[in-house]
Image (cartoon, grey):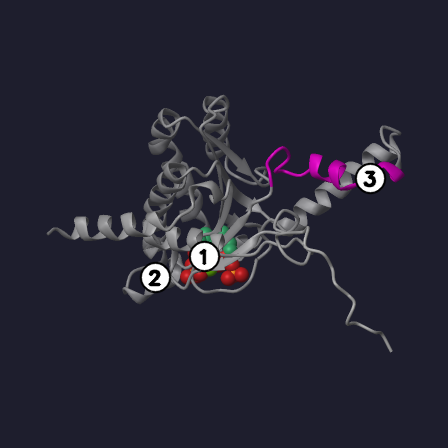
Amino acid sequence: MSFGKVIDKKNTDLSKSIDKQKVPEHVAIIMDGNGRWAIKKGFPRSFGHNKGVSVLKEIIKVSKKLGCKVLTVYAFSTENWTRPIKEVDFLLNLFSEVLKNEIEEIHEELIKIKFIGDLTPFPDALKKRIYFSESLTKNNNKFLLNICINYGGRQEIVKVAKELALKSSSGEIKPSEVNEELFNSELLTQGIKDPELLIRTSGEKRISNFLLWQLAYSEIYISEVLWPDFNETEFLKAIIDYQSRDRRFGGIESSPNESFDDSHFSPQ
Ligand code: IPE
Ligand code: IPE
Ligand code: MG
């Protein structure tokens, strides 16, 4: 039996445990651990970023096949500019190359691609590729791939606050009209439902300024696996774990019609 078949069998078994009716529509991923993966192998960090791209390609395919509708990935944070200039340059160049090489296939797969973040500081050539990719795929409706670059959750919230303050001072809205719905309509993710599931790889247990508003009620799954080693099996494990959660949203249990029996409770 070939190695490939062993892997296939494992994934077939795992996918049998998945409830097709409870697949999350929107999965967000903090793809972390590229540098550590490369260093462990005695390679430069850039090697891990390269491998990370092929993992992302696999996870797009797997999540689409499973029935997810939206995948939002963190590729470059507002804080990542503090890395050595060589690494930043490498990453920007990688984004550009990957877009050039993959956009046709993305389009053929009827995937709509959207970049989320402040694109202003990026080189013109990268911006051009981004705009081209977004406009080429804008009518695709099978799957939405959001790539967060130069993205920060706090910066996004400040941006929304500014927009609403401007609208208020120009008289377009009244301060008393500001509510969650209006706030949502100014987010970079406007129109996209919040992620039901957040996956972070590499074992780190933090959000690192990702989707602070949108993750308010997402289930969080931390994988110990470094992103370049992440794969279909690990993704399926995350989905199975997600499906075992009791999402209470501040209530008591998922079946809200249970009666509340307080007959034995006598406050002092
Ligand atoms: C995630 O991997 C990719 C980016 C942040 C661009 P890292 O580069 O953070 O890898 P580690 O966490 O240092 O191993
Ligand atoms: C978060 O990873 C950002 C991305 C994956 C793009 P980092 O490696 O930058 O986060 P920290 O430094 O561990 O918080
Ligand atoms: Mg990291």
- Identify the residue at horizontal 61%, vertical 53% (top origin): 254
Q: Nearer the viewer, mark 1 or mark 2?
A: 1
Marks 1 and 3, the one that precedes in the sequence: 3
Q: Which mark is residue 141?
A: none
- Identify the residue at horizontal 39%, vertical 55% (top origin): 237
| Residue that carries the numbered disc 1 in the rendered image | 241
State the image coordinates of residue 123 (x, y, percent, origin top left).
50, 37
Mark 3 and mark 2 in contact? Answer it, CB < 8 Å.
Answer: no
Per the model, the C-alpha gap separating discs 3 and 2 is 45 Å
Could you say which is closer to the camera, residue 186 or residue 163?
186
- Whether the magenta-drawn stretch holds residue 186 is answered as yes
Image height check: is 228 above or below 264?
above
Note whether ligand 2 is within 8 Å of mark 3: no
| Residue that carries the numbered disc 2 in the rendered image | 37
Looking at the rendered structure, the kind of residue marked 1 is Asp
* Secondary element type, mark 1: helix
Image height check: is 203 above or below 237?
below
Q: Does any portion of residue 87 appear in the rendered image?
A: no
Per the model, the C-alpha gap separating discs 1 and 2 is 25 Å
| Residue that carries the numbered disc 3 in the rendered image | 178
Image height check: is 106 above or below 93?
above
